[in-house]
Image (cartoon, rainbow, N blue to C red):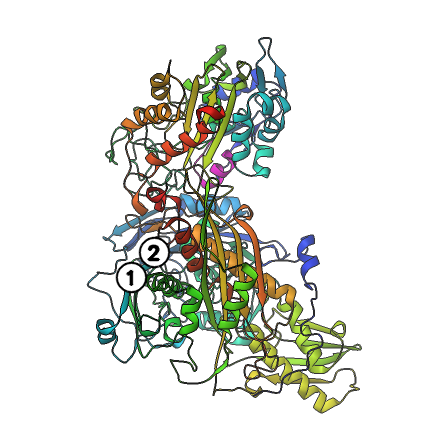
Amino acid sequence: MTDLLEPRAIGADLVRRDGELKVRGTATYAYETPVEHPAYAHPVQATIARGRVTAMDTAAAEALDGVLAVLTPFNAERLAATDDAEYAVLQGQDVGFRGQLIGVVVAETSELAREVADGITVRYEELPHDAELSADRPDLYAPEQVNAGHETDTAEGDVAAAMAAAEVTLERTYSTAMYHNNPLEPHATTALWESAGDGFLTLWDSTQGVHPDRAAVCQVFGLEQEQVRVICPYVGGGFGSKGLPHANVMLTALAARALPGRPVKLALTRQQMFFLAGYRTPTIQRMQLAADSRGRLSAIAIDVVEQTSKVKEFAEQTGVPTRMMYASPNRRSTHRLAALDVPIPSWMRAPGECPGMFGPEVAMDELAEELGIDPIELRVRNEPDVDPETGKPWSSRNLVRCLREGAERFGWSGPRAHRDGDWLVGTGVASSVYPTMRQATSTANVRFEDGRYVAEIGAADLGTGAWTILPQITADALGVDVADVDVRIGDTRYPVASVAGGSSGTNTWGSALVVAAREFRTKFGADPRDGDEASGDVDQAGQDDTHSPYAFGAQFVEARVNADTGEIRVPRLLGVFGVGRVINPRTARSQLIGGMTMGLSMALHENSAWDPRLAQVANHDLAEYHITVNADVGAIEAHWIDEHDPYVNAMGSKGIGEIGIVGTAAAVVNAVHAATGVRVRHLPVTLDKLLTALP
Amino acid sequence: MKPFAYARPGDVVEAVRDVVAEPNAVFLAGGTNLVDHLRLGVARPDLVVDVRTLTSREVTGLPDGGLRLGAATTNSQVAADPRVRERYPVLAQALLAGATGQLRNMATTGGNPLQRTRCVYFSDVTTPCNKREPGSGCSAVGGYTRYHAVLGTPAALPDPHAPETCIATHPSDMAVALAALDAQVQVLGPDGERTIPFTELHRLPGDDPSRDTVLQHGELITAIDLPVLPAGTRSAYRKVRDRASYAFALVSVAAVVTPDGELRLALGGVAHKPWRATRAEEVLRGQQLTEDAVRAAITAELAAAQPQPGIDSGNGFKIPLVARTVLATVRGLLPEEQS
């Protein structure tokens, strides 16, 4: 149990501190950092998926006026560490996926750099590639572990025996598409190596964590942490894709190293982001459920097949939420990967939980239908008393309250389907879940300066609200008015901070800030002098490991399907969440409805249409890769219950950045099924999948 | 971006002369498509001739009661014009179904019909495309065909290596309405002015998919005329797409019903050109316009349709979708007792 803060600033509906700067356009992003006399870099990308670069004709390019450098695998300097193949840019001639970086042109203008880069003739020795995922590939393998350190496979009891003995069973295969994170701000960097001495590197980089970014760059270039400064006050979205640097950061640093003293800018184009910035693997989920006639589960199992890149392994932990979501004596989860000649998958908002709550939550709806039980009631009947995975009690679990309150607010009772003129209308529900995580490393300073309290921590605000809520936490920990607290983030000059990922930022940085603030008060009392300073580490904060900490939620959808054309509209989307204490209702609501909108987008629109012949995403721009637009979003509501959790941290808060996207797609599928009778098990739900069932 | 010369001539005659004199020259109007193509390397002109201020920005009445849309009128302006909204709702609706407010404020009457296909392979200079690079082949066949043609194509799986293969669709909404309205295109070229029926402006790939229209190099659209329609004519545009806004049509339907029951029908998203459904119109000629008759007519129109296989099950769904959308659109235009 932790010593909970008395909430005063916590819970206040404060406006974003960075809001006005962003609205006025004066917040500076990585690419637009004002620097003296910048040069511009543009990458050269492989146009084959597998093979070797045998020659690159750069002579003409190098001779052009305004071209400052042309780097290729044949002339680029050798990096200190090349064990991470994603980061080993221009270190060899092998091509492992189409779009891989094989060169960079630096020029006086971005237009010239791009034209020259695009004009370089590359000769390849091309090999046949293998880029098509399927569940029956003979070469599927079990990775050593899956993302976030989870076990690859788990098993308890005997699922097969339970399936054979059960009154009702359900066995279905579901799939989610490939998705690309596509933050509004592309991956962009301004890099400057000092001309004097053995080099000091400054990176203005769009990142979800300046310190992890710096650590990776230091590793690759063989530098001490003190030789590199990463600055990133504002981020135009990341959704996981800026959680760790991608190859573009290393390429920019490499290009700038060729021009010491000259800042070099590189922003990926939207098209390039479909090759180089990570993505969510497509997943194939085979679900098995066994139940008695009252709906009590006797078995739940998920067998996941997904892809990774031969260049670097990333194993999405899709099966993980099934391990703890519902009570059942017999359980199994497995993950199998196909390693392909494809770009490298990575984190995308709620890796694991987001795709991994699609199959199970549609399957629960199918089972409810099979049993003739209301889907909310089915979930209530399978509510576990303790975490089925660990046997630990929950720090707090209010899924049932979320389902019940959501049902009340949404108007769930009554028939789930009706016709309204040309429209077939249906409703659906699904559960949400996300673990409450805290990272091991983060330090905060609190200082008294010119009559104000200043907190420093290298945290990141990628639109989440960190600029606004970290002062609220600090103010309550110090016992002062939030208006008297300034926070400085987004720079490696401030104490080390963990990545803004896994919905762990507020938990981690907030805990460090509370330790620092309490230390400050202990040392200096209520009447500090100018310059008084204290620091605190997250590992000094109380941590409970006897409970299982998760946030839960329930999402409700009304879907309308046009009886003539199959067009799908979602006029209502409502979520109720149990996320502990909400630090700031304004930024929290924004996070939750943002996640839900992204979930709607996953349900209806997003789909990286993979062309296995070329080994690339066919629709690789934002005109053709559809993201839900305003016109697709109707009434959207996020609510939260008043949840008290004394085990998670001193704020009593759980992470909220990702739970909103979890379960939405299943709720949409379930609503479309209610409306049309068609169960779309393979995302996205598009009109062509409904046409044949329309009247 | 490849460097190019930029010219801003004083009038249309000079503009035509400039383009004729340079084989690798293009006209620039609203630039909503061309500028993207300059960035992507899809268009690589040596000379860009800006005609934005040279043609008319007016919608004017014609002596016979029709309307003339100056080539430089914007899509927003035409969509908002009270005469267009009242007499040609199919056109106003088509315009508003296209792109976004920002793009419609830039895009012009002359430029909109000349926009290029949104075939993803056409836009990607690293892949073969007969339209972009004649003779290189067609990457779309057997690929991502969701937005590709089902009408006017020779086969369900044409030879991807043949130089004539192209299964692209024309992306304009406006053009589908203009095809149904029997609009006339006023053109100025090196040999003077000529008028082209809108339905003959665009062409099928034939043996040269690189050419979208019958315009010769240097020919400039100066206006588009809308012929007068009989009093009491009703019209509508229905666009079916993957999201509610800012998406190209999977299929679209422009329908015009005259008081004596004649149906003029054009389809979008299904062919290399805005597809005037002449076969369906023929079947209906002289018949009472009932739902059954329309169903039979569109079935006849689609008899030659060729579904293209491909990623995510290809585009065969378009064939029933066209029929359904035509029926729904025409149903909305029929007097109550007939529907």
Residues at marks 1 and 2, CA–CA distance in whole angstroms: 8 Å
Q: Is residue A200 above or below residue A670?
A: below
Q: Which residues are magenta?
A: B33-46
State which chain disc 1 sits on.
A
Decide if residue A209 is in sight here. no
Position of the N terminus of chain A, as image quadrant, is bottom right
* Left or right position of B205 against A377: left
> Splitting the image into 4 quarters, where does residue A381 fall?
bottom left
**Label 1 is placed on what type of residue?**
Arg
Farthest residue toward the left?
A: A138
Instruction: Name the element at disc 1.
Output: strand
Tell me what residue is drawn at x 45 percent, y 34 percent: B44
Residue that badge 1 annotates: A172
State which chain disc 2 sits on.
A
> Splitting the image into 4 quarters, where does residue A482 fall?
bottom right
* Left or right position of A148 against A490: left
Tell me what residue is drawn at x 62 percent, y 74 percent: A493
Instruction: Name the element at disc 2.
Output: loop
- Counting residues from the start of the chain, the first of labels 1 and 2 encountered is 1
**Label 2 is placed on what type of residue?**
Arg
Dot 2 alpha-carbon crowd within 10 angstroms: few under 14, some 14 to 19, many 20 or more: many
Question: In the drawing, what numbered circle is on residue A681?
Answer: 2
Q: Residue A666 at x, y = what percent?
A: 42, 59
